[in-house]
Amino acid sequence: MLLHSSFQLFISVGFLLFWAVFSQIPLGSKLSVVENNHWTSSNGNFAIGFFHRSDQYSVGIRFYSNSVPIGKQMVVWVAGAELTVGNKSYLQLTENGELVLFDSIRGVVAWTSETTNSSVASAFLLDSGNLVLLNTDREIVWQSFDTPTDTLLPGQNFSAAKMLRAASRNSVSSYYSLHVEDRLLLRWENNIVYWTSGSPSQSILRAILSSDGTLQLLDQRSKVVWSVFGEDHNDSDVKLRFLRLDVDGNLRLYSWHDVSRLWRPVWQAVENQCNVFATCGLCGICIFNASGSSVCRCPFSSTMESNLECLVPYGQDCMSGSFMTTYEHTFLYGVYPPTETITRASLHQCKRLCQEDPRCTAVTFTNDGTAQCRIMRTRYTTGQSDPSLSSISFVKRCSDPIAALPISPASSFVSSSSSSSSSSPRDTSLKRLNRLCFPCLIGVASVTFVVFILIQIGIGFCIYKRWNYIRRKAALAYTGPNSKGLITLTFSEIKDVTGNFKHQIGPKMFKGMLPNNQPVAVKDLKGATMEGRKFRSAVVKIGSIYHKNLVQLEGYCCESDHRFLVYEFAKYGSLGRCIENPKLCKRLTWRKRIEICLTVARSISYLHTGCREFVSHGNLKCENVVLDENFKAKVSEFGLGRVHDDRGGAAEEDVKDFGKLVVKLLSAQQEADDVCEWAYENWVKGQAEKVVDVRIEDGVNSEELERVLRIAFWCLQVEGQMRPSMGEVIKVLEGTLTVDPPPPPFICQHPQD
Ligand SMILES: *[C@@H]1O[C@H](CO)[C@@H](O)[C@H](O)[C@H]1NC(C)=O
Ligand SMILES: *[C@@H]1O[C@H](CO)[C@@H](O)[C@H](O)[C@H]1NC(C)=O
Ligand SMILES: *[C@@H]1O[C@H](CO)[C@@H](O)[C@H](O)[C@H]1NC(C)=O
Ligand SMILES: *[C@@H]1O[C@H](CO)[C@@H](O)[C@H](O)[C@H]1NC(C)=O
Ligand SMILES: *[C@@H]1O[C@H](CO)[C@@H](O)[C@H](O)[C@H]1NC(C)=O
């Protein structure tokens, strides 16, 4: 009897040990594409390993349960989101306790968990599908649940700093995302909200999917504030569930149905798929077909467009008049840009307003009691059509069939200023969209995703850093840091710190020393007549931005008329100054200059898309890029520009300024106003190397030069909408996205002049 029970004990201990060994991932373990091996959770429901994706590979967590056949093993988390790597890549849990994804194609570490310094002692793939790294005290230092991609699993916290992002499908840089703010929000790009979970509530902290299939919003005390559930909510036979933001922009709850062996959608956020903003993208308008599925159709097809794109046929090159075609029960709206003029007008007035406006491309009249007239001035238009809709749309077409034909590339250099001119930039932009759009779609998406994921990983680190930082500040003798970790100084303290403005190091910029001997750069914002309250709120916003390539704001002074900003000090001063200085300029090699371009692009992209609120730089130029003691570039004086009504416009301005900065940095021609025109002319004549600073000694990579100039000229396009996003710029600078030759960016002379 005794023998029997100790034998049993032995068996069960052995069994437990076996499972512990089975699910623990020892330091030093490796997964590789070649071996096609996995780490599995102890219940066998999840596995992490490489999987094939768009001709390459990604590493991620997927359903691995016996009941789910191979083709249905949904991926629920991917290292680096849309990151793909080559066929000899591997993921290793290093002896230092860091997860490292090595890409065999580029020969670099493509992604890491950044946990070398966190004393990671063990790793597990938990039964919930959460991959966790634990330290010696068995505390979680990193978990895959903190960096969701497009999916939430039961038990996964989804809070304000996180977002789900759908795989990009329709165009170069548009994307759908899910956020928790004062409620759940679905957004298109940065600004269009197309679904919310009811009315806002200040107390909301996080969202969570419970194991019984309820999606809940919880407040600080974990009280349920809002919830929805799927149709099989109480069905105890359902074991596997997930919530995903799908590529079509809808948020759906799925559960595994054992009988039909299918993932069944049991709830979706936007009931009518056609109400998802831009669900058809540039591929037409949304309708329901006879079997009730939403499909995209192109009612305004013309010979010019491929069937992948469906644009309004009217362009600004239309010489010989236009006419309007009528679309009953059809509602249209612009996608690029997603804004239009809305006025009150009768049906006939509405149609006439468009006919008489040479820039109008289409108009929608909605008579739901308000007689609303939406005037669109873009060919990038989408919408929906359904017999139940009370809207009627008119789409403009050109009477002149010749105008619809593509024009030869030679004539693209001819341009004039009247509105009847130049279809060429548009055509080129279309070609560019076409080329960028499809083969490189995944590529672009992955970079944006990688950046986004890295930022997310960074957040945890930043919080830690910031806490340290606040502690450090608290040791100061001065007024002391406010709640945001910024020091507030009086004007006399500013005078103290700068030794009565003794060392001027730039325009309105002085070197100073804090009482703890930390050198700082003090910027006098004289002339910037910003109201105190506005100034403080701008400062607090800027002060809360942490990025290794952004100059840190340390403090400020806001006393009567005095406005000063106190920044961390950069040893070599501004890039503008370094270009001028013969000794420092030697260090600005070709490699270095390209690196600076990329650094600046990444910082601006971070400001645009990585911060919780959109921030524009507003004044990007060589003077506002500084070089630190390691000769690394950092961007300064951001977030002080005009407050723009539309962030699209503000972002486009930054992109233009970036283009200028690149040309000035490569050419070292800082003073000339027409340096960009001059550079473009040289490039057109095939003499790109003439643009480059002659003092560069390490030789110029001509392939790289071509690429960098092309993207700079795209940034400099007069028409803001044609400028790329910073995410695309980064990709081009890294050499992973090809870029077409740009059309003339400026109102240029004819080449034969
Ligand atoms: C791996 O990828 C390279 C190109 O990236 C290709 O040439 C090679 O055939 C691939 N090998 C296998 C086994 O698929
Ligand atoms: C880890 O710590 C070392 C020494 O403190 C430091 O040099 C290194 O940058 C840190 N690494 C990370 C990823 O924080
Ligand atoms: C989710 O958040 C709650 C409250 O902060 C916490 O108790 C719980 O452990 C978190 N769950 C995970 C998986 O991180
Ligand atoms: C689910 O089942 C429980 C008990 O089985 C019941 O109390 C509850 O009302 C049910 N909820 C719904 C939404 O059907
Ligand atoms: C409606 O569209 C769906 C999805 O594209 C398709 O599977 C179905 O066959 C279509 N039905 C009809 C009647 O065209």
Image: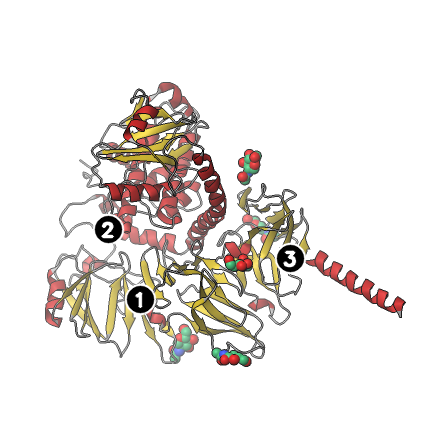
Regarding mark 3 in the picture, which secondary structure is present there? strand
Amino acid marked by disc 3 = His
Residue, disc 1? 284
Judging depth in this view, the residue of 574 and 544 nearest the camera is 544
In which quarter of the view is residue 333 placed? bottom left
Judging depth in this view, the residue of 146 and 216 nearest the camera is 216
Judging depth in this view, the residue of 516 and 200 nearest the camera is 516
Do residues under tags 2 and 1 come within 8 Å of each other at their CB atoms? no
Regarding mark 2 in the picture, which secondary structure is present there? loop
Q: Ligand 2 shows up in which quadrant of the image?
A: top right
Q: Which mark is residue 645?
A: 2
Real-space CA distance between mark 2 and mark 1, rounded to the nearest whole angstrom = 29 Å
Q: Which mark is residue 678?
A: none
- Name the colouring of the figure: secondary structure
Q: Is mark 1 within 8 Å of ligand 5?
A: no
In which quarter of the view is residue 238 placed? bottom right
Q: Is residue 618 left or right of residue 317?
A: right
Crowd around label 1: few <14 · some 14–19 · many ≥20 (10 Å):
many
- Please state which of the two labelled residues, at mark 3 or mark 1, is closer to the viewer: 3
Q: Earlier in the sequence, mark 3 or mark 1?
A: 3
Judging depth in this view, the residue of 132 and 366 nearest the camera is 132
Residue, disc 3? 38
- Please state which of the two labelled residues, at mark 2 or mark 3, is closer to the viewer: 2
Identify the residue shown where x is 31% and y is 25%: 510
Do residues under tags 3 and 1 come within 8 Å of each other at their CB atoms? no
> Residue 423's spot in the image, x, y percent?
21, 52
Regarding mark 1 in the picture, which secondary structure is present there? loop
Amino acid marked by disc 2 = Asp
> Residue 18's spot in the image, x, y percent?
75, 59
Q: Earlier in the sequence, mark 2 or mark 1?
A: 1
Amino acid marked by disc 1 = Gly
